[in-house]
Image: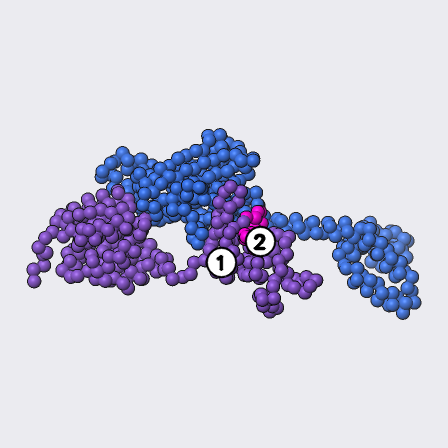
Chain colours: A blue, B purple
Amino acid sequence: MNPDPSDPTGNAAERGGSRPAAQRSASRQALGDIGDGIVVVWWRFFDWLAIVPWKTLLLVGVLGLILASILKHPLPFLMLLIASLIIKVVAGGKRRAELTASEATKRAETQHLERTVIEARMEALQAQIEPHFLFNTLASIDQLIVTDPPRASKMQQSLIRYLRSALPQMRGGGRPTLGQQVSLSTAFLEIMAIRMEDRLQVVMNVPEGLKSAGFPSMVLQTLVENAIKHGLEPKANGGKLEIDAEIVDGQLAVHVLDTGMGFLPKSEGGVGLANIRDRLKALYNGRAELIITVPPAGGTCATIKVPYEVVPATA
Amino acid sequence: MQPAPASAPAAVVADDERLMRDQLIARLKVAWPELSIVGEAANGREAVASVHRLEPDIVFLDVRMPEMDGIQAAKALAGMVHVVFVTAYDEYAVGAFEQGAVDYLVKPADPDRLLLTCQRLRERLQHKPAPMDDLLAQLSQRLGGDMKAREYMRWVQASVGANIRMIPTSDILFFHAEDKYTRVQTEGFEALIRKPIKELIDELDPAEFWQIHRATVVRVDAIEQVSRNLRGHQVVHVKGSHEKLEVSRTFNHLFRQM
């Protein structure tokens, strides 16, 4: 007997008798590996059983039986086949449901990610400041500096407030609130009121209490710009623009009403409206909508409905 | 030849914003004191009317105006008066003006640039105003005002409850004729309109909607699949609706296999 494990000449019988610790653990690991392998194979087999159509399973069974009878040992295979059938009946449905569920979760995650990306891209699109608006406003300020400096200063301040929240890179993080969106549009409308003079009357009807509600950025502004550009500006005498907000059945409803040209069934409605619809879909997954109606008195009413959620104040 | 006209030249200024008219008039006074501004207009229609009434030598037209835009007004006035376009934003590739019979100004008019415009106008006043057909055609094309392209219905006006609602065609799954009305089906609701299928199909974009039956028009993008029912008819399944729509034989060719 040679107890020295490092002895290279030790014979097999001796090694068999007193296996060194290192070798023992190695073989245990090998056993474990085989065990793991069996488990994996078993679950693979289980999954396969769960999703394989009955027809295929029966076909495989018949072929296997023929093969087994040729080998003269049909019994074990028959037992395996019967066991498989039982497993498929008892557990197959559950396993299949699990598989579908995990696939669905994976799909939902990708979809969510896709939606976030699309939303970000669309928000950037929606936010574009119209050069025409910007240059016309600057030209107006230029004129007022000569004729009415205090008014020029007021207009310039409104422009600064507008740009601060309308420029994408200035918008910053945090969830936008209705209050922020209303103040952005207010700045815009102050400017338009100076430019359009008595051709534009603005009515703001947004209760103070609703201003902390979450509201997607630039959506209200797009509707306001549409009302001015397609509704009131093309009308020689202009008209009224009204913004209302209310809670309807637990949803926040924001209306932009104008007494302008009215909606033409063949008009494209701008990329703006289609963009709003897509964004609402991406952001609220069907729980928000944009509705365009024609008020009895003419003009256009655009309504956005989103779930009412208060954004907690930061700071 | 004597270059100076006998009487002082007259001009009309048209812009929908008063501030902008005031600005141009004030700057013209400095750049060309002899020019008299005989009229102002707040939209294209008014501009055309004042030119007819006052017969000025020159009209300054804002490109974007209500009722009738500057381009349309210029078309109506072609050959009657020298036209200078005014715009806030150089979006119409205004370079085209430079070779043309007219001039253009960008708001707010730069005093030096305005001097140049006045100089050009003084020279042009010797001649009859040029017809601007080519230039205007080019411009209106740039402005997207080309009316030749056929416009299809993009919105359906329908009563939903007490309201008249504008439903974008992209939300509509299908139209189906029912007695006196046509049913408009969207994913969320249905509405009734009076316009019959026969008229609808002429106004809808054939790339967006297909008629599949005398009584049915379906939005192509909403089609999920087409199968056959027990009677061997093709049946269209629509996303977001459980209804199955039968395809009549006349329209079978729409779904022939590729």
Give me the residue at 49% from left, 32% from top. A210
Numbered badge on residue B178: 2
Element class at badge 2: strand
Q: CA distance from mark 2 to mark 1?
A: 15 Å
Instruction: Choose between A280 and A61: the one closer to the eye.
Output: A280
Q: Which mark is residue B231?
A: none
Of the numbered discs 2 and 1, the one sitting upstream in the chain is: 2
Going by the numbered disc 1, the residue's amino acid type is Glu
Q: In the rendered image, which quarter is residue B96 located in?
A: bottom left
Q: Is residue B187 visible?
A: yes
Q: Amino acid at mark 2?
A: Glu
Q: Main secondary structure of the magenta part?
A: strand
Give the residue at mark 1. B199
In percent of width and height, residue A187 lies at 37, 38
Q: Position of residue A126 (x, y in %)?
A: 45, 48
What residue is drawn where x is 38% and y is 44%?
A: A260
Q: Position of residue B209 (x, y in %)?
A: 53, 59
Pinpoint the chain carrying mark 1: B
Question: What residue is drawn where x is 28% and y is 51%?
Answer: B44
Residue placed furthest toward the front: B180
Q: Nearer the viewer, residue A30 or A121?
A: A121
Specify whether A265 is left or right of A28.
left
What is the magenta range? B177-191
Query: From where the camera sits, is residue B111 visible?
Result: no
The answer to whether B128 is drawn above or below residue A102 in the figure is: below
